[in-house]
Image: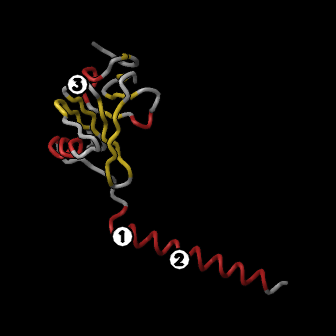
Amino acid sequence: MTDAVPAAVLQFVGSLAAVVAIVTVAWLLGSRKSANLSDEEEARELFRLAPGGFEPVEIALDTEGAAAIARDADGRLAMLVPHGNQFVFRLVPPDTPIRVEGDSVTPGNRPFLRITIGESARDWANTDSGDNNG
């Protein structure tokens, strides 16, 4: 029975080393890069590629390029949010309050979807909270 314990430990250490090696190689190959929007045109194209189509007439980019919010001609709101090194399209349900907090907007009660868009934040909010200053 004492021989089984060192073998199990050795197997665990070997497996752990293999996982660390895989993660290191993936990191070195660039998987550490997070999604980033370079400009409004890139965001516009990603919104257009959404399932069912979404033609934005107004777009606001996150100040760091980490997300975007858009409005179409029908008044629907959608967001591009990061998922690893890609973006995911999220249609915002019509009854969702969009709150402004300083220069950021947050859809509903989802602080993880908060995006910082600067002074135009007030233009996107339908429920004011936090710092309004004007």
The residue at which mark 3 appears reads as 74
10 Å crowding of disc 2: few (<14), some (14-19), many (20+): few
| Residue 120 horizontal/vertical position (percent) | 23, 25
Q: CA distance from mark 2 to mark 3?
A: 52 Å
> Which residue is at a point 33% across and 70% down the rendered structure image?
29
Q: Calculate the distance from the C-alpha at mark 1 to the C-alpha at mark 2.
A: 15 Å
Mark 1 falls on what kind of element? helix
Q: What's under tag 3, amino acid-wise? A: Asp
- Whether residues under marks 3 and 1 lie with C-beta atoms below 8 angstroms apart, the answer is no
Residue type for callout 2: Ala
Q: Is residue 33 above or below residue 48?
A: below
* Residue shown at 29% from the left, 44% from the top: 51
Residue 123: x and y, percent? Answer: 24, 21
State left or right for residue 52 relative to residue 25. left
Say what secondary structure mark 2 lies in: helix
Q: Quadrant of the C terminus?
A: top left
Whole-percent x, y for residue 108 in the image = 43, 26
Could you tell me the amino acid type at mark 1? Leu
Residue at image coords 39%, 69%: 26
Residue at label 2? 18
Q: Is residue 39 left or right of residue 110?
A: left
Tell which tag, 1 or 2, sits nearer the viewer: 2
Residue picked out by circle 1: 28
> Which corner quadrant of the image does residue 121 belong to?
top left
